[in-house]
Image (tube, rainbow, N blue to C red):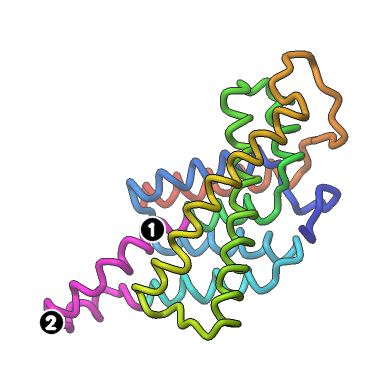
Amino acid sequence: MLGGLSNPCNPNPITKLCVTFLMGFTALNQINIYFEWGIVLIIAFLFYKNGFGKDAMKSIIFFGLLSFLLSFKMLEETNPGVKMLFILVIVVRIFYLPFLAGKFLIKTSDVGSIISSMDKIKFSRNISIPVAVMFRFFPSFKEEKQNIKLAMKIRGINPKNPFLYIKYVAVPLLVISSNIADDIARAAETRAIENPIKKTRYIDIKLKPVDFVYALLTVAIVIGGWHI
């Protein structure tokens, strides 16, 4: 993670989690397109300031393509068959803001900072422990998937074939997922994660000006987008 906790433009994980939760409401009640662009640009700027320039550019370009493909004039000129093909694009468009906020949370946060933040605000361990396991699981899962694809490439197996993909990628990933979950659970138990006594955290989480700016801007934009 290039941004790091010392970066003044890297918000607290709890702030990022709350913004992600807020973005989920935009999937239920879509906001004005100009306000959506405002949120995308804010998150893209924070991506850039945390050392993820490529993700910043990808988020802007991808949202621009989604907005162009789903322009009403363009859809009106197409036949019903082509419109059916846009259903998936519409679904992606609806959930893009929550996805982008969640991606920013995952990319710029580590497990230690997330657990420290939750301990700071007295979060229930029934929530904090599953979150810690989840953040440990997905990076390991992604790494194993890349290893499987690399092994297939070395052996000359084409993963684009759906039947071979199920046989050589999907099935091994199911088995590996179970093993990863077991390993993470054992590691957590070994480190006494269930011990009720107060723990001393190496990482100290504090609120920074960017937390208030990020939270207040997104709240204002979402509320403003609903009323226009």
Q: Which mark identifies residue 176?
A: none
Q: Quadrant of residue 190?
A: top right
- The structure residue drawn at horizontal position 52% and vertical position 76%, both measured from the top left corner, is 61
The alpha-carbon separation of the residues under discs 2 and 1 comes to 26 Å
53 or 216: nearer the viewer: 53
**x and y percentages locating residue 71 in the rendered image:** 30, 75
| The magenta stretch spans residue 142 | no
Of circles 2 and 1, the one toward us is 2
Which residue is rendered at x = 59% and y = 60% of the image?
Answer: 142
Give the answer, above or below, for where 69 lies relative to 156: above
Tell me residue 78's x, y (percent): 17, 83
Kind of residue at disc 2: Asn
Residue 20, percent from left and from top: 53, 46
Quadrant in which residue 112 is drawn: top right
- Magenta segment boundaries in residue numbering: 69-97
Label 2 sits on a secondary structure element that is: loop
Secondary structure predominantly adopted by residues drawn in magenta: helix
**Is 147 or 113 nearer to us in this picture?**
147
Horizontal relation, residue 45 to residue 7: left or right = left
Q: Residue furthest top?
A: 197
User: Is-magenta flag for residue 92?
Assistant: yes
Q: Which badge, 2 or 1, comes first in the chain's sequence?
A: 1
Asked if 183 appears above or below 191 in the picture, the reply is below
Compared to residue 46, the image places residue 208 above or below, namely above
Q: Secondary structure at mark 1?
A: loop
- What residue is shown with label 2? 79
Q: Quadrant of the N terminus?
A: bottom right
In this rendering, position of residue 72 left or right of residue 191: left
Q: Which residue is mark 1?
A: 32
Front-most of residues 60 and 111: 111
Q: Looking at the image, which residue is at 47% across and 47% down?
A: 23
